[in-house]
Image (cartoon, rainbow, N blue to C red):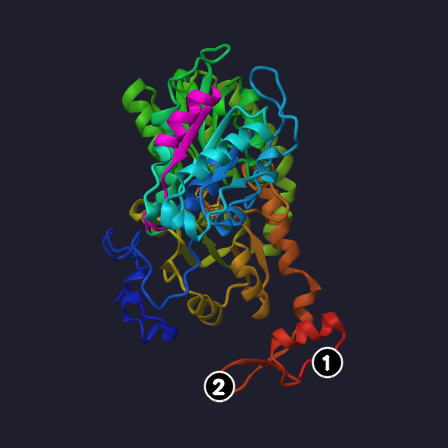
Amino acid sequence: MPYELFEVDKEIPDRKKHTYVKDSADPTDEIPKCNTTTIPGCMTERGCAFAGVKGVITGAVKDVIHVVHSPVGCTTYGCGSKRYPTSPDLPNGDKVPIDQFNLKYIMGTDLKESDVVFGGMKKLRQSVLEAAKEFPFVNAIYTYATCTTGLIGDDMDAVAKELSEEIGKDVIAFNAPGFSGPTQSKGHHVGNLTLFNKLVGTKEPPETTPYDINLIGEYNIDGDLWVLEKYFDEIGIKLLSKFTGDCSHDEICWMHRAKLSLVRCQRSATYIADLIEEKYGIPYIKVDFFGPRYCAENLMTVAKHFGLEEKAEKLIQQEMAEIQPKLDFYKEKLQGKKVWVFSGGPKNWHLPEPLKEHLGMETVAVSTMFEHEDGYEKIKERVGEGTVILDDPNSLELEEIIEVYKPDIILSGIKEKYIAHKFGVPCVLIHSYENGPYIGFEGFINLAQDIYASIYNPVWNMLEFEETPEDGKLKTESGVSSEQKISSEKTGKEVV
Ligand code: CFM
């Protein structure tokens, strides 16, 4: 049977359908059940639909202020949570006057009980006007529905329309209350649709060239976008619009003028590429730049589209020559190490092959928070026999993966990092990165270096565990749990 019920899931048998163990003999449609609501009883690692739109799609836009229509908790949660840096430069030559403005500021309507009873539209209006006054340099104001305002049914679009006219700038409402879908993936979709419907086609770029592209689904995590921008620059391809890493509000408005779209994150942003193709006839290519081979192949594909193969060839040779000695070093050190990859979705199929091919590492477990069928098909293609593929793992399963599949390293997010550490397993962040960028040629070396530094960190040799048969829990030699031992070493105080 390709599906497996984890020990910790005995009381939640439905989890079995979400836990697939790769067997090449299976037909391709054998993949974990996915994109459904979390099973009650599971402590999920997922984010909400509001997080999907603000935390992923729109949060990187550098010259807008966000007004979250919610009690204050969602506003706090929505502030600067993702590491997408921006440059201050705007396409018209202006500069955003506050450095990394997109990461530093967010506003909220601070809804109270009486607003829930009597409606919050007045407060929203007031807050948007205040935002326009506080930050006069912004080029647009984005507002967000949340669970509370979705439930009371405030008409965000009506307020946005009225205020756009009054303020003379775009005020956009994003209607993705937290509960509107099973995961943040729903928010990605709403973000794409809203930006397409409200913005694309409404402005013209200052200039165009025959080599203009939209780079879609690249959010500039720790500078990824700037690595790709440098490559495209050298090949002679111009990024007319980015969606949405280091992007300005206006760039989204003129995405209809590009000659080609590239879709980098195919989970969060294929929607807008499809819509642009359908309405404006601009084709798109799905691209993957993680790992040297994928990066080289995909740069060539894009260059070919514009007849710029020679320049791409030259760039690839240069970059490969530069990284090869480092790649050889890390491969020697990391060969045979076992990995568990846990991300939202796409990074789970981007990484296993490059890790195998360039570093000799074996992916033994893969899990995602919100991947859909197409992504799971790619994951299945790209991992070896016996790899466990989990959809929406709960926190107890995370521990069981560590105990059963014994990864040497976990590539994941901050929520899992400390679980891993408590089990004495190193962890490298692949959502927000440790020392990125991780994309492209030099990015892959950064990733390899972080993996190497984590696995070979001498701290792991200082931990000693022994099994206690009574409860099966991991204990250190002295009898205190590993967690207690680490904290006592840190504080110098005895833990009882
Ligand atoms: Fe796309 Fe992303 Fe990802 Fe994503 Fe994310 Fe992310 Fe991710 Mo964290 S946009 S789907 S919602 S590649 S924040 S940069 S790492 S879960 S796999």
Q: Observer-nearest residue: 247 or 287?
A: 247
Among the two numbered marks 1 and 2 on one chain, the one whose residue lies closer to the N terminus? 2
**Residue placed most toward the observer, 237 or 281:** 281
Residue 40 is inside the magenta segment? no
Badge 2: residue crowd in 10 Å (few <14, some 14–19, many ≥20): few
Q: Is residue 257 left or right of residue 131?
A: left
Q: Measured from the top left, where is residue 176 in percent x and y?
A: 37, 42
Circle count:
2
- Secondary structure found at label 1: loop
> Which quadrant holds the C terminus?
bottom right
Residue 379 drawn at (x, y percent): 37, 50
Q: Nearer the viewer, mark 1 or mark 2?
A: 1
Q: Is residue 126 visible?
A: yes
Residue denoted by label 2: 471
- Labelled disc at residue 494: 1
Give yes or no for residue 168 being in the magenta stretch.
yes
- Quarter of the picture holding the N terminus: bottom left
In the image, residue 476 above or below residue 33? below
- Residue 476, quarter of picture: bottom right
> Toward the viewer: 471 or 407?
471
Residues shaded magenta: 158-181
Q: Residue most toward the right?
A: 492
Evaluate whether residue 64 shows in this view: no
What label sits on residue 270 in the rendered view?
none
Q: Residue 343, position in %: x, y?
A: 46, 51
Side of 300 relative to 283 (left or right): right
